[in-house]
Amino acid sequence: MDTPPVKLSPRQEEVWGLLHDGRWHLGSELSNARTGGSEGLRRLRELRTLGFTFEKKWAKSLRHPRNGNRLFPNTRDQYAYRLTGFEGPDPRDL
């Protein structure tokens, strides 16, 4: 899917553009300046109400195998999201 199947706001389109590759993305990736900062996760919820479907999983930050310390001290455990499909109305019917 190269273009969203429904009309999106510019910020929603930024979130969709990041997620439409089908890979897992951390919540912090969705919260950037282009998506409206901390509102990126809100855009994700908006996309869900439009009919997009997502998977969510708990993603632990990378840790040292021996001592369990975080490899990147400024990271934290958070959710990751993946776009799985679209179950909204067929755009041809709109």
Image (cartoon, rainbow, N blue to C red):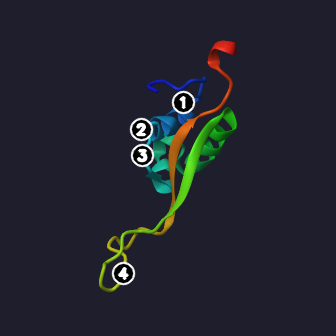
Q: Quadrant of the C terminus?
A: top right
Q: Where residue 1 sits: x, y (%)?
A: 46, 27
Q: Secondary structure at mark 1?
A: helix
Determine contact: label 2, label 4, CB under 8 Å: no
* Depth check, front residue: 36 or 58: 58
To which residue does mark 3 refer? 23
Determine the residue positioned at 65% across, 20% down. 90
Determine contact: label 4, label 3, CB under 8 Å: no
Q: Amino acid at mark 3?
A: Arg
Determine the residue positioned at 57% across, 45% down. 54
Q: Amino acid at mark 1?
A: Pro
Q: Amino acid at mark 4?
A: Asn
Q: Secondary structure at mark 4?
A: loop
Instruction: Please tell me whether mark 2 or mark 1 is closer to you in this view.
Output: 2
Q: Check the image and report above or below for 38 versus 9.
A: below
Q: Where residue 88 sits: x, y (%)?
A: 66, 29
Q: Earlier in the sequence, mark 4 or mark 3?
A: 3
Q: Earlier in the sequence, mark 1 or mark 4?
A: 1
To which residue does mark 1 refer? 10
Gap in angstroms between the C-alphas marked 4 and 3: 26 Å
Gap in angstroms between the C-alphas marked 1 and 4: 39 Å
To which residue does mark 2 refer? 21
* Depth check, front residue: 66 or 47: 66
Report the label total: 4
To which residue does mark 4 refer? 69
Q: Secondary structure at mark 3?
A: loop
Gap in angstroms between the C-alphas marked 2 and 1: 18 Å
Q: Earlier in the sequence, mark 3 or mark 1?
A: 1
Gap in angstroms between the C-alphas marked 3 and 1: 21 Å
Q: Quadrant of residue 2?
A: top left
Q: Secondary structure at mark 2?
A: loop
Q: Earlier in the sequence, mark 2 or mark 1?
A: 1
